[in-house]
Image (cartoon, helix red, strand yellow):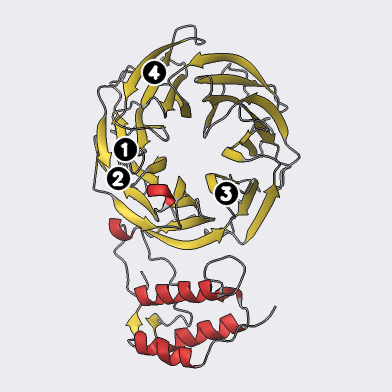
Amino acid sequence: MIKRAIPSAFLAFFMLMFPSSRAAAQMDPCEPAEQFVETHRYTLGDYPWAVDAGDIDHDGDQDLVVTNWQGSTLHILLNDGTGAFPLREEITLSHRPRHIRLVDFNNDSNLDMVVSMEGDQPMNGFISVWFNSGDGSFDEPVATEVDRLNDSFALTDLNDDGLIDVVSCDSVSDQVRLLQNDGNGQLTLLTSVQVGDDPRSVAMDDLNGDGHIDIVTANYSAETVSVLIANADGVSWSQTVHTMPNPPSDIMIADLDQDGDLDLAMPIFGVGTNPGRNIALLLNEGDGTFPPNSLLNIGSNPRGIDAADTNNDGILDLAVASFGLFGTGQYANVMFGEGSGSFLPQEYYGTGNGPTDVLFVELNDDGYIDLVVTNALDSISILLNTCGFPPECTVDLDGDEDLDFFDVSAFLLAYLSFDPIADFNGDGQFNFFDVSTFLVAFKAGCP
């Protein structure tokens, strides 16, 4: 590796621009505007699409798996227990992956990967099951060819045989397909259900408390949401269609108003040069019926959505990936719940370019839910929850709680000696981007 020397004048220039010695400011615990801080950003290649979390290596920490759509790769990131992921594996695929979920697919107490993939032709696709060997490594996949897949599938036990089955979207025939798991990774079609035009996301749960699994789809081109309530036989459904103001890009089921019933939330994508800036809420009446939707102002062309109680107040909060106009967004947006289905105005948390998916998960065993965001340009952002205590000040390199000349000097020495502490953007290289990231963080001060 060839060392890239930094001119000695750099130090003087830097201190001239940012001369003051500043204490690393302390943060008010659970202050909404500062609750999530990006502590790591890992480069994963072209167009990370979806993310899921689980303890795949049985060490007690939540690991991450990510699909890279444009790059045709999967990425496995093993958590070191602090919310950092120093061990990362890339798996090259022959087809582009879309959605991914971790689940024990064969009841061996190991989390397996289920991945939807594009096929060789525009009208076909695959669902691949990657069985976990038990140590976080995965066997060769078992693939089932299906009709064209889109962004989403859902997992549940459809036939009470103790095995997790798959419900996938087919945007060509405008159906959801119910696929039975044989326990060895092969899937067999049970039945198909017609829904609206171009279903791109599907979710399932018992919406009316009758013990049967109901289905909800976000129909992108139709600009509708289909709610399919299971009939008494459990194998047929009665459908209600709800009109959205613009295309729904994802769908989530959760009790958003604390009444014991499961509600629906859908990020609303834009049309053309008019970005969507809303989440549509459908609050359950308790019987699986939903009055007209209300809109929450959040994000710019929001895509992925998730909900969790991130400040331990007993109320669910909402997050979306703010993709922006043509992928120019650089934020995840969070609305903190107030109860009864109402939310505070959105907060903005910096990420990489073009966020595509969000996931709430506790990464560092501190009792608070953290936030993971995939970014279309090339990366994944780890945003740790600062409730309870402030995050580590990564630019306070001498640990004296002041940002000054000595921290700049420590960074330069680390950079020139290729010390990993100077790899500020986490890409495994030492270049201008590390210097730039350090400068921006130093200027902003510590949380």
Residue designated by label 3: 64
> Which residue, as the protein is rendered here, is positioned at the far front?
272
Under mark 2, the amino acid is Ile
Residue designated by label 2: 298
Q: Earlier in the sequence, mark 3 or mark 2?
A: 3
Q: CA distance from mark 4 to mark 2?
A: 31 Å
Under mark 3, the amino acid is Leu
Under mark 4, the amino acid is Gly
Q: Nearer the viewer, mark 4 or mark 3?
A: 3
Q: CA distance from mark 3 to mark 2?
A: 26 Å
Under mark 1, the amino acid is Ile
Q: Are marks 4 and 3 in contact (CB under 8 Å)?
A: no
Callout 3 environment at 10 Å: few (<14), some (14 to 19), or many (20+)? many
Q: Is residue 364 visible?
A: no
Q: Nearer the viewer, mark 3 or mark 2?
A: 2
Residue at x 59% of width, y 74% of height: 430
Please give the label number shown on residue 209: 4
Callout 2 environment at 10 Å: few (<14), some (14 to 19), or many (20+)? many
Q: CA distance from mark 1 to mark 2?
A: 7 Å
Give residue 39's position: percent from left, percent from top.
46, 63
Callout 1 environment at 10 Å: few (<14), some (14 to 19), or many (20+)? many
Please give the label number shown on residue 279: 1
